[in-house]
Amino acid sequence: MTNVPNSTATDGPSGKAPSFRDNVKERELVRLCQDGTTDAFEQLILRHQHRIFSVVRSILRRREDVEDVAQQVFIKAFVSIRSFDMRAAFSTWLYKIAVNECWDYLRRKRVRPLLYEADLSEEQNQHLSSYVATERAPADASKRAELRQTVELLLAQLDDEDRQMLVLKEVEGLSVQEISEVMELNINTVKVRLFRARAKLVEWHQRRQPQAARASAGRKRE
Amino acid sequence: MPKENERKACPEFEPLLEDLLDGEQQAGEAQRLQAHLDGCARCTSTLRAAQQASQLLREFIEPAPAPSTGFALRTMHAIRAVEESAAAETSFWRPVQIFAWRLAMSAGLALALLIGYAQVVPEASEVNGEEIARSAVPQEMYAPQSRGDVLLMVSSAGDDK
């Protein structure tokens, strides 16, 4: 039986880029898997599981589905590992599988997270405004949960790619370089789109404020 | 859907503004950006909005759950199950595959022989089979049975001339 190089190094939530030595080991592990040493794949899972969870989460939004889809990603990667020609990094290839699997999953479930401006209530707007003004999160758990829901609604206004990029950057802590690999985009494009997407979020919130105030005044008159 | 009239920063400074938010600025670029921000209200306000958005997302959006301790093991278990079922499927269909392969080979060989035969053998005559059969069988000679028969034959031969 072939010895599998033992590695406890995982990508970890800190998101450090793998060193050259790690890359060499990774190629060795991939080659072993391609030659039929199934056990070597476990090391690859341990190395990439955190990043794959982040990528999947950035697209799916439902935390409950993340583990199932991540597992499917690794199974698909294993099944087609012989077709991986090592021209790109293994991580890039794996991210591509993850992104495709997520969209397939959403298509199968027929999920279309379409939300409209009216989805944000006046109260939600007020809470968000007061947070933006003071930059202090409420201590009350229910208010925090409400604000979280409001931010999720705002985030849902962005197009799929922009939303995914922002979550990967701000929530999952991926670098611009890593995002460009996941999404197969030029680094400069990622920077510009990230910056614009952030500005859009706040802009939309601010645009809703006068509308919400008008709607509230109308209701009071009635 | 939201309209595309959001505030926008000056396009050439957007990557630098993103670097500033990311804390990844190079010294020369930082000075250039600061000089620009001092005179550009639009970039300054967009930068402020982007900072607020970052704050909101970091504060309120929950990151992905960490993989549970047994995730890798469970996934390997699932992978082995997939491997085993693929192997079982292969062994079940193997005899059928071999038979189909042999059948296809035999059919191919027969077809090749037929084509070869058609090329080598010359085209058959268009004369129909009945005529060929009649000409191949020798005509039976008529033997006269009496004196009258002989005279009849002589007279009919004279008529032919």
Image: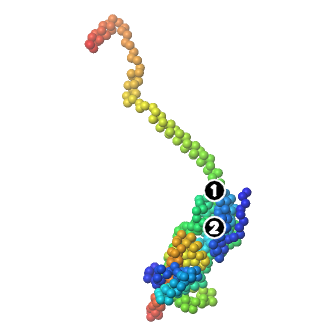
Q: Is residue A219 visible?
A: no
Q: Residues within 10 Å of mark 1 (few under 14, many from 20)?
A: few
Q: Which residue is mark 1?
A: B86
Q: Is residue A18 visible?
A: yes
Q: Secondary structure under badge 1?
A: helix
The disc numbered 2 marks a residue on which chain?
A
Quarter assignment of residue B78: bottom right
The disc numbered 1 marks a residue on which chain?
B
Q: Which residue is at a point 43% across and 31% down the rendered structure image?
A: B122
Place of residue A101 in the rendered image (x, y in percent of width and height, measured from the top left):
57, 67
The C terminus of chain A lies in quadrant: bottom left
Q: Is residue A134 above or below residue A178?
A: below
Q: Residue furthest bottom?
A: A221
Place of residue A79 in the rendered image (x, y in percent of width and height, measured from the top left):
62, 60
Q: Which residue is mark 2?
A: A71
Q: Which residue is at a point 52% across and 41% down the rendered structure image?
A: B108
Q: Secondary structure under badge 2?
A: helix
Q: Nearer the viewer, residue B58 or A176?
A: A176
Do tag 1 and tag 2 residues touch (Cβ < 8 Å)? no
Q: Nearer the viewer, residue A25 or B35?
A: B35
Q: Distance of mark 1 from mark 2, alpha carbons?
A: 18 Å
Same-subunit check for callouts 1 and 2: no
